[in-house]
Amino acid sequence: MMRHGITHVGTTRPGDRRTRCPSVMAGRVASLDIATVGEPSASHARIREIGLRIRRLRVERRLTLQRLAERSGVAASTISRLENGRRRTPTVAVIERLAAALDCSPSDIMGVEPPGEAVRDPAGDLLSTLIMTSVDDTGPIMRARDLRSGVAQIRRLRQRCLYREVLVAATEILPAAHAAFGGSHAAAGQLVSVCFDASIAARIAGDTAVAWICAERAQEAADRDGGAALRQGATFARAFAALADGAADRALKIAEGGLVRKGVGTASGAGMLHLVAAAATARLRGSVARGRYGAHLDAARGLLPAAREDTDVFALGFAAPNVWLWALNIALDRGDVAEADRVRAYIQARDLPLARKASLQVGLARLALLKGDQRLARSLMERAAKLAPQYVAGHRAARLVSLALGAAGAAAAGAAAAGEVTGS
């Protein structure tokens, strides 16, 4: 029944179809459904764009349909239909309520660009592509050779620490990778590989929400049509993304769950899961949890001989120098200067891939800061920036070191200024 622009609806029926979005499950809610009054001739494409923006904003803020409905007063069923382009253009009242609940401006939902030149957001473009595609999609079709070449190029970009370029390339090739999925085991590997590389790139670029969603898509594809090695890699990506987002308990659960899953996998894949589990346990509170990180590190080291015979499916560089680098970063997370000093002697930088070399410089800069040597820390960060500027610009630890150095510099300048004033 319609009254004063408000449609009253009952509770959601148990048989109603639910809309699923990557990593977000719709919930039930009984609330007011604000009526939409739009022109019947309004462009369906524009309505879909509005819905896509609403979904993207909701996913980025980790909100379920039910939670957004509760915050905005707009029914979950209405939001779902908007997101899927099945409603006419929403009223101003609906847009304003959703914008307030999503902590954005109405123009962010409607797609009105502010004055000035828009800056492309490759992570946002990738997220939009992931939302619009699924493993059951068909088309567009790309020649198998071109698809293989594109997937290999994304891997090379990641190894060169060109993370923005990875996200752009992944956005362009994902529709074709989804369309090819299911055709063969190789096609499954290609989709998992693209999503894996995009997850790692998004994580290092600082967009942990996109990293998680990419990792979930990799896991979905690997679980459906991939082998044990692909499942291991996708599980590592999920655990790594959770760890980057500060969810150490979740990362540990994912990593340890992957270690006990059925299937042979590879020694290097299991070793990487042990490393992320070690990093997660080191961040958890409680002596029992913290005590487990040493066991995971030992398990990773124990897998090194077998890993030499493996094919490094995801180019993660599971080798002794990388294991020791993880141990260094874990010691730094715990603030254990003595352990960090001991571990760094085992790391041979020349044997590390580019991203790990930059990570080592950042880790040594963290150690220098813990020792109070700001000059050395600044020199190490400059070296890291020369090696991999996008890594340093996006990686959380690198940004924290840069902020600490900036704050220290400002404090020193302030002290000097105060001394000059006092002296005068």
Image (cartoon, rainbow, N blue to C red):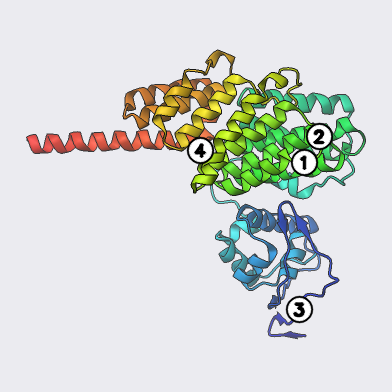
Mark 1 touches mark 2? (CB < 8 Å): yes
Work out how far the residue at label 1 is from the one at label 3, CA to CA, in angstroms.
40 Å
Residue under label 3, please give it: 11
Inspect this view and state whether residue 125 appears. no
Residue type (three-letter) at the residue carrying disc 4: Arg
Q: Which of marks 4 and 1 precedes in the sequence?
A: 1
Q: Which of marks 3 and 1 precedes in the sequence?
A: 3
Secondary element at tag 4: helix
Crowd band around label 1 with a 10 angstrom C-alpha radius: few (<14), some (14–19), many (20+) = few
Mark 1 touches mark 3? (CB < 8 Å): no
Q: Please tell me the numbered disc located at residue 228.
A: 2
Work out how far the residue at label 1 is from the one at label 4, CA to CA, in angstroms.
31 Å
Q: Position of residue 53 (x, y in %)?
A: 67, 55
Work out how far the residue at label 3 is from the one at label 2, CA to CA, in angstroms.
43 Å
Labels 4, 2: front one: 2
Labels 1, 4: front one: 1
Q: Position of residue 318 (x, y in %)?
A: 65, 24
Placement of 8 over or under 125, stated as above or below? below
Residue nearer the viewer, 304 or 247: 304
Q: Quadrant of residue 155?
A: top right
Secondary element at tag 1: loop
Work out how far the residue at label 3 is from the one at label 4, CA to CA, in angstroms.
44 Å
Q: Position of residue 421 (x, y in %)?
A: 11, 38
Placement of 353 over or under 284, stated as above or below? above
Residue nearer the viewer, 83 or 282: 282
Q: State the residue at coordinates (81%, 39%).
A: 262
Crowd band around label 2 with a 10 angstrom C-alpha radius: few (<14), some (14–19), many (20+) = some
Residue under label 4, please give it: 396
